């Protein structure tokens, strides 16, 4: 069999395989399961855990300052924070496996009003089984993982905002 | 006489068939004792890789550059690497070893999968003579948030020496110990080097840092340094 023929056969097999396995990108719904432990220091050195955000919907974003898609979605998270002021939503950005200096270098150029946590040894990244950046978890007020998104989005509009609003709507009256 | 003629023709036909399976690659000849088999990632071969291969040859390291995407006319996807038939690479490795030079394979990203499969398909004595450097290898079968990672089984790597080059700025860096454990469980001897201040594929980034641009231009020096420090012979 000629090399050219083999190439076409391989291509055909791949196209068939890919079309069978294709899935729409976007938020992944998860059965409500307790979140893994989160234990990390913020930039002032204070230790934070999920208990600090109990009673709120939590947007937990794993990111890094070297990751362009992570930085692309950061402004929309800040706009979401402003839009949701006074409502029980906590936005938490956990930097994966970088030093405080690296994170501060980015924050000197980009002002963010939500807490930034550090994970210099990657221990939280591993507990949450994060393999790509950004990865974002949406937790309900009971601390259960409800949605996962791998990759960036515009957090203050569209599907992301609708999901957050739906999670807030599940809460007693104060969320609305 | 007729028997020998048939035998000769059979051997010629077999040899031709085997050679036909060797994937197309670019050769950068050199007189030195080392031969580097450079297997480009699933995104295809980038210009800085060719330039580095040329400079390596100028420094005495013969380099064979293989772009599997182009050689097998595949889409630029990680899954394409999994579809590469191993036999062609096996023949390629054997052809390299037949040169008499010290062969080191350097595979990038998901290209690690067909390279390791080919190494596993070698005879044990052939495998023990091979050194493999993997740049941020991707061997995952499953890498889903909140789920334990699962790595691809490629077959026995007993006797194979593997060195992983891992850019620090990568989501895979925290998972490197698990990857090395997996290679060891498959029988390889595995070590690693962290490449500071670099991201995966730094030589083909859309928005590289100044340091990445500089490192792209001296990729040959980085590879020579790592080859020498590793000392795999």
Image (cartoon, coloured by chain):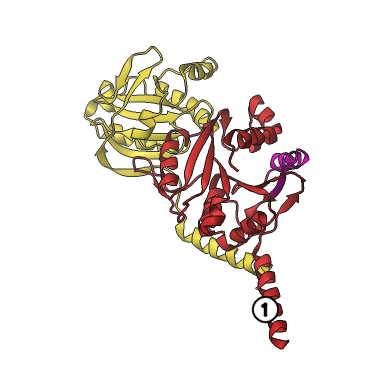
Q: Which residue in the protein does label 1 denote?
A: B10
Look at the image and tell me in which quarter the N terminus of chain B lies. bottom right
Look at the image and tell me in which quarter the C terminus of chain B lies. top right
Q: Residue A104's x, y, as percent?
A: 49, 16
Please give the range of residues in magenta: B46-64
**How many numbered dots are placed on residues in this image?**
1
Residue A153 visible somewhere in the drawing: no
The one of B156 and A30 positioned closer to us in this rendering: B156
Q: Residue at x 51, y 33 (%)?
A: B170
Q: Is residue B52 magenta?
A: yes
Q: Residue A45's x, y, as percent?
A: 37, 13
Q: Is residue A4 left or right of residue A21?
A: right
Residue B58 visible somewhere in the drawing: yes
Q: Residue at x 40, y 30 (%)?
A: A61
- Most distant residue in the bottom direction: B2
The one of A113 and B17 positioned closer to us in this rendering: B17
Instruction: Classify mark 1: residues with Cα within 10 Å, few (<14), some (14-19) or many (20+).
Output: few
Task: Give the drawing colour for chain B.
Answer: red
Q: Residue B14's x, y, as percent?
A: 65, 73
Say if B84 sits above or below B160 in the image: below
Q: Is residue B49 magenta?
A: yes
Task: Give the drawing colour for chain A.
Answer: yellow
Quarter of the image where one finds residue B156: bottom left
């Amino acid at each position: 069999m000629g090399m050219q023929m083999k190439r076409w056969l391989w291509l055909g097999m791949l196209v068939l395989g890919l079309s069978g396995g294709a899935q729409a990108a976007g938020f992944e719904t998860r059965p409500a399961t307790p979140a893994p432990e989160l234990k990390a220091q913020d930039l002032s050195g204070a230790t934070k855990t999920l208990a600090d955000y109990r009673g709120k919907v939590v947007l937990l974003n794993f990111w890094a300052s070297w990751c362009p898609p992570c930085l692309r979605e950061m402004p929309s998270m800040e706009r979401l924070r402003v839009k949701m002021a006074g409502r029980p939503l906590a936005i938490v950005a956990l930097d994966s496996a970088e030093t405080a200096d690296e994170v501060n270098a980015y924050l000197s150029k980009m002002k963010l009003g939500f807490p930034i946590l550090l994970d210099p040894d990657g221990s939280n990244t591993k507990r949450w089984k994060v393999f790509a950046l950004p990865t974002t978890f949406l937790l309900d007020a009971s601390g259960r993982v409800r949605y996962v998104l791998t990759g960036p989005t515009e957090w203050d509009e569209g599907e992301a905002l609708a999901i957050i609003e739906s999670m807030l709507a599940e809460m007693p009256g104060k969320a609305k | 006489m007729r028997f020998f003629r048939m035998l000769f023709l059979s051997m010629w036909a077999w040899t031709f068939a085997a050679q036909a399976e060797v994937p197309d690659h670019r050769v950068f000849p050199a007189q030195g004792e080392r031969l580097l088999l450079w297997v480009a990632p699933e995104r295809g071969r980038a210009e800085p890789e060719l330039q580095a291969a040329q400079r390596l040859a100028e420094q005495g390291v013969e380099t064979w550059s293989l772009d599997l995407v182009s050689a097998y006319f595949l889409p630029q996807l990680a899954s394409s690497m999994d579809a590469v038939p191993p036999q062609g690479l096996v023949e390629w490795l054997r052809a390299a070893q037949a040169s008499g030079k010290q062969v080191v394979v350097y595979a990038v990203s998901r290209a690690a999968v067909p390279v390791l499969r080919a190494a596993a398909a070698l005879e044990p004595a052939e495998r023990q003579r091979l050194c493999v450097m993997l740049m941020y290898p991707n061997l995952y079968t499953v890498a889903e948030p909140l789920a334990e990672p699962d790595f691809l089984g490629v077959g026995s790597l007993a006797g194979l020496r593997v060195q992983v080059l891992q850019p620090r700025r990568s989501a895979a860096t925290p998972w490197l110990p698990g990857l090395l454990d997996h290679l060891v469980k498959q029988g390889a001897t595995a070590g690693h080097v962290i490449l500071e201040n670099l991201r995966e594929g730094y030589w083909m980034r859309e928005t590289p840092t100044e340091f990445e641009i500089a490192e792209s231009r001296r990729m040959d020096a980085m590879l020579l340094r790592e080859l020498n420090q590793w000392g795999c012979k």
